[in-house]
Amino acid sequence: MPGTTEYNELMHEIFSSMGENSHISTPITAVRPHNVKIGKNVIVMPGCLMMSAGGITIDDGAMIAANVQIISNNHDLYERQVITCKPVNIGKNVWIGAGATILPGVTIGDNAVVGAASVVTKDVEANTIVAGNPAKLIKVIPPKLESRSQNINDEVIQLGLDSCGD
C-alpha cells in the first residue's frame, strides 16, 4: 500500500538513489532504475515511464505528472539493434505536465514548466514555460517577489494542498 513503510522501502530498493520525502506512485515502468537519481521532495505520479540506460537525474522538488515519459536512450539510425544513450537532467522545482515526453540528452533548467503532452527535444532554460510538439518557449517566468505588502484587512483563504479544495 502506498504511504506505508513497506512501500517506501520497496521504492528505495528499486530507486537506490532516492532522496528523503520523495514519493513515487505506481504503476511505474523503469528500465535500469539504478541509473535514476532522485533528489529530495520529488513527486512522480502514476504511469511514468523511465528509460534510463543513459541516466536520469531528477533534482530536488521536481513534480512529474501522470503518464510522463523520460527517455535517455534511443536506437542508432543505421544499426537499430545498437542503443545510443544521452543523459536527461531535470532541475530543481521543475514541473512536468501530464503525458509529456522528455527525449535523450535534454536538460530542463531549474523552476521550468513543461506543458502537458509536450515533446521536449531540446534543452529548456531555467524559469521558462515550454509546450507543444516539439516544445517551444511560451513564457519566461518572472521572478517571485520575496516580500509582498498585504493589507492587514485582506483575508487569505487556503483551500488545502491544491486549488481543488482537497
Image (cartoon, rainbow, N blue to C red):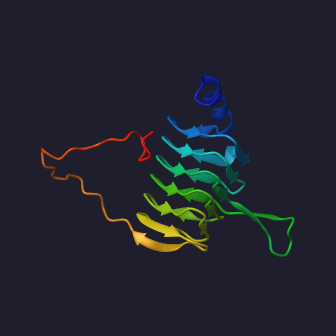
Count all numbered tags in the image, as a single digit.
Answer: 0
Name the quadrant containing residue 159: top left
Quadrant location, the C terminus: top left
Left or right side of 161 for 108? right
Task: Give x and y (percent) for residue 129.
Answer: 46, 66
Q: Look at the picture and state if 155 lies above or below 98.
A: above
Q: Nearer the viewer, residue 29 or 73?
A: 29
Task: Give x and y (percent) for residue 65.
Answer: 57, 51
Name the quadrant containing residue 51: bottom right
> Can residue 131 be seen by looking at this rendering?
yes
Task: Give x and y (percent) for residue 88.
Answer: 61, 59
> Can residue 125 be seen by looking at this rendering?
no
Quadrant location, the N terminus: top right
Residue at 85%, 69% (x, y): give it. Answer: 80
Q: Look at the picture and state if 125 lies above or below 69.
A: below
Q: Nearer the viewer, residue 24 or 9?
A: 24
Residue positioned most to the top:
5
Left or right side of 8 for 161? left
Residue at 53%, 38% (x, y): give it. Answer: 22
